[in-house]
Amino acid sequence: MNRPRIYMDYHATTPVDPRVFKAMEPYFSELYGNPASKNHSFGREARDAVEKAREQIATLIGAKPREIIFTSGATESNNLALKGVARVLGRTSASAKKHIVTVATEHRAVLDPCEVLAREGFEVTYLGVRADGLIDLAELAAAITDRTFLVSVMQANNEIGVIQKLEEIGAYCRDRGVVFHVDGAQAVGKIPVDVGAMGIDLLSISGHKLYAPKGIGALYVRSGQPRLTLQSQMDGGGHEQGLRSGTLPTPLIVALGVACDICQTEMDAEADTVGALRDQLLHGILEAVDGVQVNGSLEQRLPGNLNLCFGGIEAESLLQKVPDIALSTGSACTTANLQPSHVLKALGLGHEAALSSVRFGLGRYTTGEEIELVISQVVEAVKELREKSLLSNFS
Ligand SMILES: *Cc1c(COP(=O)(O)O)cnc(C)c1O
C-alpha cells in the first residue's frame, strides 16, 4: 500500500496558496511592464499592482504603505535592518554607539549579520532565555547601556514557536531611545502584529512562510520622528526610496500582497483550527508514549508549532522511521558530527535531550486525518526504537 506523504514542516516553508498563485499569474505574461516605467500604461499598471500590494502588507501589520520596502525575503530584510542601522549609527562620531542586544535563540539570519558586525568592531550581547524560551525583561533592561543603539528580538521562534512579549520589549526600547528590530518571519500572518502598539521600528517579513512564493519579502521601516536612517545594502537605480535598488518583481509582490490580505481575513479562524489540530497531535502522542516533553512554553506559542523531546531516542533515527512525514530536528549536520540546535541548548536542554527533539510544523492545509496518521506512525516508531535500545542494552 502506498502511504500518503504528509507535510509537517510549515516553519521551513509553506506551499503557495492557490488563490495567491492565481492572482500573480497574469503579471508574468500579460501585465509584464516594469513598475519603474513611468511613460506608458504597461509600467503604470504594474506600478498600481505593486502599490496595492504595499497597502495590503501595511494593513496586516498596522503600518503605512510607504513604510514597506520590498526585499527578496527575511534574510535580506534582517541584513538590511541590522547592517543598515549599524553602519549609519555606528560610524557617525568617536562617541558613536557601538552596542547591539539580541537573543541566543534568534535565527541564523540575525545571528550571522551580528557576527559580521562584531568583526567590524561592534559589541554584541546575546541574551539567554528561560526554560520556557522567553527572555527575561530585567535581563534585557540590564543589558542596555548608553552605547546601545539596537535591540533585535524575533517575534516567534522558528524551532519552538515561542512568542516573545513584544509590547513590553518595544516600550522599553522606546524609553531608552534604542532602535527595535523584529524578525517577524514566523509570526506575520499567523498571529497579530501591530508595529505601533509593539513599538517596532523595523520588521522583517518573509513571503514563503505565509503562503506566498520564495524569493520575496519586505522590511517595515518606521517613518516619522526621530528619523530612522538605514544604509542601503544594494545600490543601483534608487528603487524603494534608495534603500533597495533592483527592478521590483511584480508577480511576487502581488503574491505577497494577496497572501497578507488572506491572512488578514482568515488569521483568527485559522489559528483556532491549526491550534486545535496541534493539541490533538500533542495529546495523541502523550497518551500513547511516556517520557515525552514539550520544549518551550505551550501557552506563548504559535498555534502551528510543536517541539517534542522523545526521551531515550535519537531524533534522526525517528525521522528515518517515518519517511513519509516531513519533519525537522533543528540540529545541524557538520562534516563529522551532529550539532544540537542552538535554540534547544539555549533552553537548557542537554546534548542528548536536544538531539532527541523533533519539530512538528502544522499549517493551512493540515487535516485531522493527517494528524491521526502522524500520531500512529510516530508512536509506533518511538516504541520500536525504544525496544531496540532496550535489547541492545542487555546484549
Ligand atoms: C525562514 C526564516 C528566515 C529567513 O527567511 P527567508 O525569507 O527564507 O530569507 C528568517 N528568520 C526566521 C525566523 C525564519 O523562520
Image: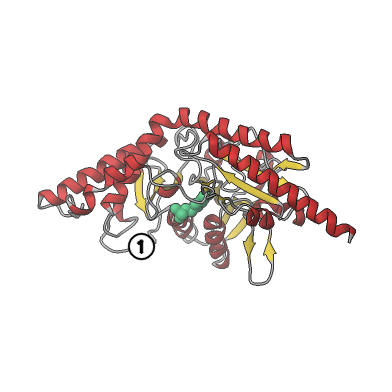
Q: Residue furthest front?
A: 1
Q: Residue furthest left?
A: 40
Residue drawn at (62%, 54%), measured in percent from left and top?
330
Q: Residue 199, can we see it?
A: yes
Residue at (35, 45) in percent of width and height: 256
Query: Which sits in the foreground, 20 or 51?
Result: 20
Q: Is residue 161 above or below residue 43?
A: above
Is residue 357 or residue 111 the one in the foreground?
Answer: 357
Q: Nearer the viewer, residue 250 or 84?
A: 250
Expressed as whole percent of the image width and height from the top left, the position of residue 59 reads: 36, 34
Left or right: residue 380 compared with residue 242: right
Residue 325 image position (x, y, % from top left): 57, 49
Question: Picture quarter containing residue 320?
Answer: bottom right
Which residue is pictured at 77% across the width and 48% down the height? Answer: 311
Q: Give the percent coordinates (x, y) of residue 377.
A: 64, 45
Extreme bottom residue here? 335
Label 1 amino acid? Met
* x then y, percent, for residue 233: 39, 61
Q: Horizontally, is 24 left or right of 262 in the view?
A: left
Q: Residues within 10 Å of mark 1 (few under 14, many from 20)?
A: some
Query: Element under label 1?
Result: loop
Write down the residue under mark 1: 234
